[in-house]
Image (cartoon, helix red, strand yellow):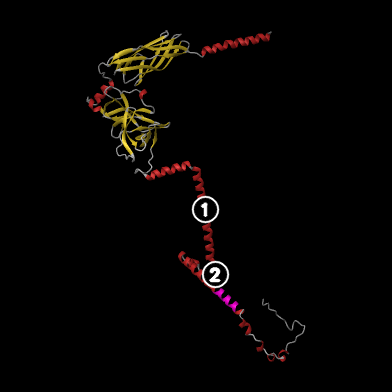
Amino acid sequence: MKIMKRIAAVLLALCLTIPMYSVMSYAASGRVSFTDLQTKTGETVEVACALRAGTGSLESFDITLKYDASLLSFKEGNGVTKESDGVLKFSGKGDGTNKIRFTMKFQALKAGTTKIEVVNSTGVVTGGETVECVNGTSTIQIAEGTTPQTETTEQTSTENGGDASQSGITVSGKSYQFSEDFNSSSIPVGFVETKLSYNGGERKFVRQENGSIVLGYLVDAENKGDFFLYNEEDATFSPYVQVTVSPSTSIVLLENNEGVKVPSGYQKVKLTVNEHEFPAWQDKKNEGFYLVYAMDSKGTKGFYQYDTEQESYQRYVSDGTDGTDKAATKVSKLNNFITEHLSMVILCVGLGILLLVIIIIVLAVKLRHRNLELDDLYEEYDIDVEDLDDEESDDKLVSLKEEKAIEESLIEEQKEEFIEDFEDEDFVDDFDSEDFDDEDFDDEDFEDFDFDDDDDDFDMNFIDLN
């Protein structure tokens, strides 16, 4: 019975613990709301923002907002600070209620419809619980009115001596004005703000973080702004269109191609990319292929082939028939071949090295035999090697070989003559028995010789004539 009670107590404790952790895993709910307004260009509009918690009292609240700096110019706001162009931040404390309210003032710059949006928001209610908010937006409709004079416009006009024509810029036949009034959210990915000397002062541009591309912000007569490619060498602008070639590589199309030699077989045309026209060259044999002049992130310029069917770009490599550098083309082809057949190339190089080693060994053996032969001849003919140079040594070797060959030939001839004479019948006939009479050998001549068995008196020598 006691065991059953203990088990029940443990189960009850677990049941009480589970909902406790469930409650702690959820945060209080809240909402961020704005007022929607209508205004005209040149007018100042006040936008109200309210922060509400579903339950509990708000102790603090932090919120970050973004807006289009090309349509609105921030003036002021209670508790609101400007982080950068197009970005605002508000930090406030609660008053014991579940609501915090603040206002912001903007000047309308040009006609259009824009929104003020929440980037992030963080609230804390009594007890330390965080507030998860549903974020709203403020829609502002701007109609045509008077031309606004923003701080940026006034500063630019003063620095230029009041002559607005000094900032006039023509790109592709269209007139623009240089502007620094762009927000950070509109900066292209991979670029950061920078300061450069332009038009008599330090101006705000954006530069590629891992490259050499610089962009400037230009606005047209309708106050529509965009980034353009800036050439620091001659302080000129051209359309900026970035094209992704691969996940790790992108190129920027170039409008200026002066001094560039176009490959043969292409005719010049115009190619429209992102509402901008760029010079291009169409392949006469393949109508769906074009060449464009572009620059990569490292600043290297060159031709890229554009396939209209697959809408892809690829670096163009000349085949050497259009007057470009043939040596570079051959090197490129060789590199490609080595890369594709690396194992075969390594095997061939290894066999070549082995063959070279064998040839060297054979030549070394032959040279050693030649030196030994030369030493034997020098020793045979008693020649001092130190008194001869290399050329004389070679001549002497040839002479000695010739002499030795002549001597061997003479010896062979004499040997053959001797054998012929010995086998000749006349040589045998010269020894006639009649020439040796008995009278020539008298017994008295042999009386002095004692022929007995004593070996001491007579020793016979036998000559082996075989």
Q: Is residue 154 left or right of residue 34?
A: left
Percent x, y for residue 458?
73, 83
What residue is shown at x 24% (from left), y 24% (from top)? 158
Report x, y in % for residue 284: 34, 37
Please tell me which residue is depicted at 52% across the width and 72% down the height of the picture.
406
Name above or below for residue 258 compared with residue 106. below
In the rendered picture of this protein, how many numbered marks are placed on residues?
Answer: 2
Task: Tell me where residue 164 appears, x and y as whole percent.
Answer: 23, 25
Q: Is residue 403 left or right of residue 103?
A: right
Of pointers 2 and 1, the one earlier in the residue sequence: 1
Q: Quadrant of the N terminus?
A: top right
**Residue stretch in magenta:** 410-420
Q: Residues within 10 Å of mark 2 (few under 14, many from 20)?
A: few
Magenta residues, dominant SS class: helix
The quadrant where residue 316 appears: top left
Q: Is residue 200 in sight in this rendering?
A: no
- Disc 2 to disc 1, C-alpha distance: 35 Å
* Residue on which disc 1 sits: 357
Secondary element under disc 1, as helix, strand or loop, is helix
Q: Nearer the viewer, mark 2 or mark 1?
A: 1
Could you tell me the amino acid type at mark 2?
Answer: Glu
Return the mark for residue 380: 2
Do callouts 2 and 1 mark residues in contact (Cβ within 8 Å)? no
**Up-down: is 466 above or below 340?**
below
Residue 202 on image: x %, y %: 29, 28
Q: Hey, what amino acid is under mark 1?
A: Val
Towards the viewer: 104 or 307: 307
